[in-house]
């Protein structure tokens, strides 16, 4: 059993994918370090759940608006150059944040403005990534590549919050921004030698109008029930279930009384669970995600989130919080990675950038969900807000089982990879 779990992922047989993975790890670390530092600065300047939610909204709103355009560009121009340009801009933005913090002149509007610009850049960066890395592996390794790509975000959740928390405690928030800039720069450099083994996803796209490309992708998704259900469920769970991440400073400081270091540990435990889920999927030879599996993972994710909020309110136990963050990370990642794997297996290469951009709206919705979570949190408190979001996610998963019977047949299109 252990031998099966700890097999080397087949995606790592590709040298180009290994290089990409290292660069993506550095860049995603930059994203997460920046976001952690932004939340911490906001919490220090104005101790309000609403302003924490606004940081998420500032990152998410432009990405939400522009991501389909970013996906269309990923299908029509050189994806590598889009990513390199994005890393350069992001590195410049966090250097500005570092300077403002060093001179102690940073204000809330600085944080929000830079978050808006960064969100606009990520609308082009992230869809290009989703369309680019499948070109670095063969078909047999695609599911493994999807899981290992997801593991980047999840493993960084272990490392980045802990690193950021300890850096803030030992030095200052400006140092966190400097590390972020280094991560973005590393990604830009490591992308330079990569070429990919497949180019069909971008062929014959440049002659089509950009607006027509966006319309084509939306029509395709809405015509295909499996795409509607997969993306719709993910969007709902991200909007209502992801609020615990944005409200974590409240849990760490006001409920568990563990400060920045404790916040880092809580998010890191969520990341540990997520990485375990990523490795579980990445090292298996069967394309795993059936509709039943996806629904079960989503339901268990919602239940874990709801119990976290409930027990935080009733007991204030940091230890229980750690355990529940572990289970929440595991089940949430099982749901999201399985969904991504199913989409990447089924989407035509020429539509990959746009369809995965539509799926990528999940990240924006999670941040936008922070606004409603912040408003509810002002009236009812962070624990109840998180509990309510988890209940919504679990309830929708159960409803899907009875209302959308086609959903459970999604996995029948998956095939065994020898």
Image: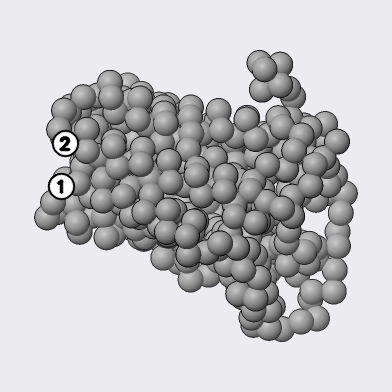
Residue identifier under label 1: 381
Side of 379 relative to 120 (left or right):
left
Q: Nearer the viewer, residue 30 or 317?
A: 317
Residue 73 placement (x, y as % from top left):
68, 69
Disc 1, SS: loop
| Residue plotted at (31% across, 50% down) | 391
| Residue plotted at (49% across, 56% down) | 401
Residue identifier under label 2: 313
> What is the CA distance from the residue labelled 1 to the residue labelled 2?
9 Å
Q: Residue furthest left?
A: 379
Q: Which mark is residue 200?
A: none
Side of 82 relative to 142 (left or right):
left
**Quadrant for the C terminus in the image:** top right
Residue 368 placement (x, y as % from top left):
36, 60
Q: Nearer the viewer, residue 124 or 1?
A: 1
Contact (Cβ within 8 Å) of mark 1 with mark 2: yes
Q: Taking the image as drawn, is residue 183 in sight?
A: no
Task: Single out the mark in the foreground, 1 or 2.
Answer: 2
The colour scheme is one colour
Q: Is residue 180 above or below residue 108?
A: above
Residue 6 placement (x, y as % from top left):
68, 20
Residue 22 placement (x, y as % from top left):
67, 34
Q: Nearer the viewer, residue 66 or 409?
A: 409
Quarter-of-image position of residue 137: top right
Task: First in sequence, mark 1 or 2: give its number.
Answer: 2
**Quadrant for the N terminus in the image:** top right
């Amino acid at each position: 059993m252990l031998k099966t779990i700890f097999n080397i992922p087949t995606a790592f047989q590709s040298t180009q994918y290994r290089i990409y993975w290292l660069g993506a790890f550095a860049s995603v670390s930059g994203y997460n370090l920046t976001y952690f530092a932004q939340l911490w600065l906001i919490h220090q300047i104005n101790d309000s759940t609403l302003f924490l939610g606004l940081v998420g909204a500032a990152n998410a709103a432009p990405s939400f608006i522009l991501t389909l355009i970013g996906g269309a560009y990923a299908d029509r121009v050189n994806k590598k150059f889009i990513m390199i340009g994005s890393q350069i801009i992001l590195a410049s933005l966090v250097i500005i944040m570092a300077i403002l913090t060093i001179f102690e002149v940073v204000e809330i509007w600085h944080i929000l403005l830079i978050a808006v610009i960064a969100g606009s850049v990520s609308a082009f960066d992230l869809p290009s990534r989703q369309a680019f890395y499948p070109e670095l592996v063969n078909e047999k390794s695609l599911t493994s590549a999807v899981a290992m790509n997801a593991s980047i975000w999840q493993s960084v959740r272990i490392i980045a919050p802990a690193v950021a928390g300890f850096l803030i405690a030992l030095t200052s928030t400006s140092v966190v921004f400097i590390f972020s800039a280094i991560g973005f720069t590393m990604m830009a450099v490591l992308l330079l030698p990569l070429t990919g083994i497949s180019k069909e996803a971008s062929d014959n796209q440049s002659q089509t109008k950009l607006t027509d490309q966006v319309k084509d992708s939306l029509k395709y998704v809405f015509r295909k029930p499996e795409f509607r259900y997969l993306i719709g469920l993910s969007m709902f769970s991200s909007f209502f279930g992801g609020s615990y991440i944005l409200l974590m400073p409240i849990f760490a400081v006001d409920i568990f009384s563990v400060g920045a270091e404790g916040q880092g540990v809580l998010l890191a435990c969520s990341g540990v669970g997520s990485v375990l889920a990523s490795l579980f999927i990445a090292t298996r030879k069967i394309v795993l995600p059936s509709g039943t599996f996806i629904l079960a993972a989503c339901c268990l994710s919602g239940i874990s989130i709801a119990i976290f909020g409930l027990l935080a309110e009733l007991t204030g136990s940091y230890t229980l919080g750690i355990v529940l963050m572990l289970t929440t990370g595991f089940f949430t990642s099982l749901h999201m990675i399985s969904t991504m794997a199913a989409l990447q297996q089924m989407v035509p290469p020429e539509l990959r950038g746009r369809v995965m951009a539509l799926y990528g709206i999940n990240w924006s919705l999670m941040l936008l969900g922070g606004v409603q979570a912040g408003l509810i949190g002002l009236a009812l408190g962070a624990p109840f807000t998180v509990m309510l979001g988890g209940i919504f996610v679990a309830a929708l998963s159960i409803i899907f089982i009875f209302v959308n019977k086609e959903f459970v047949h999604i996995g029948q299109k998956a095939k065994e990879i020898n």
